[in-house]
Amino acid sequence: MEYLKSFPRATLVATCVFYGIFNVLIGPVTEELFFRGYLTSHYEKQNTGTPILVAVLFSLYHLWLPFHNVFRIIIFVPPAVVVYKKKNIYISILFHCLCNLFSVISFCTAIL
């Protein structure tokens, strides 16, 4: 973290802004449209286990954070089940955006 603090403040602010845009909006919307939208609807044997399977695949997709897989599965299974039952993908998009917002806030707070 000390290395990051050696950059000019304007660079750090710009980094936080772009990190926020991509990690709070673009990334979660894209992932949810693929995993909860496309993948869930195209899974041939749809049943109540489908959202759990998709949540596990979603977690494994994040290979760069393998130690967070169990946590991510536990956190994302309930919204995946709600989305599956209600047929409303906006629930998981909002949930995913909010989860990522917390990580962006903690990162930006740490470096600014």
Image (cartoon, rainbow, N blue to C red):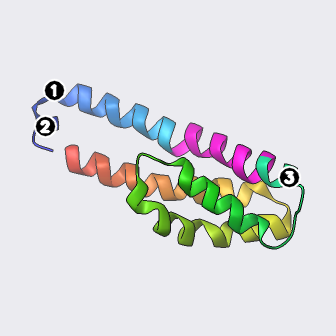
Which range is magenta? 24-38
Label at residue 104:
none
Q: Secondary structure at mark 3?
A: helix
* The quadrant where residue 82 appears: bottom right
25 in the magenta segment? yes
Which residue is disc 3 drawn over? 41
Q: Secondary structure at mark 1?
A: loop
Percent position of residue 58, x then y: 61, 54
Residue at image coords 30%, 46%? 108
Amino acid type, callout 2: Lys
Picture residue at 85% right of the left edge, 61% below the top: 87
Residue at the spot of label 2 = 5
Q: Is residue 36 magenta?
A: yes
Distance (Cα) linking label 2 and label 1: 8 Å
Q: What's the residue at 86%, 70% (across, down)?
A: 47
Quadrant (top left, top right, bottom left, bottom right) of the C terminus: top left
Per the model, the C-alpha gap separating discs 1 and 3 is 46 Å
Q: Secondary structure at mark 2?
A: helix
Residue 32 point in image, percent of width and height: 68, 49
Residue at 51%, 45% in the rendered image: 24
Q: Identify which amino acid the numbered label 3 is placed on.
A: Ser
Question: Which residue is identified by label 1?
Answer: 8
Camera-side residue of 35 and 90: 35
User: What is the quadrant of the N terminus in the image?
Assistant: top left
Relative to 52, say whether 26 is above or below: above
Specify which label sits upstream in the sequence, 1 or 3: 1
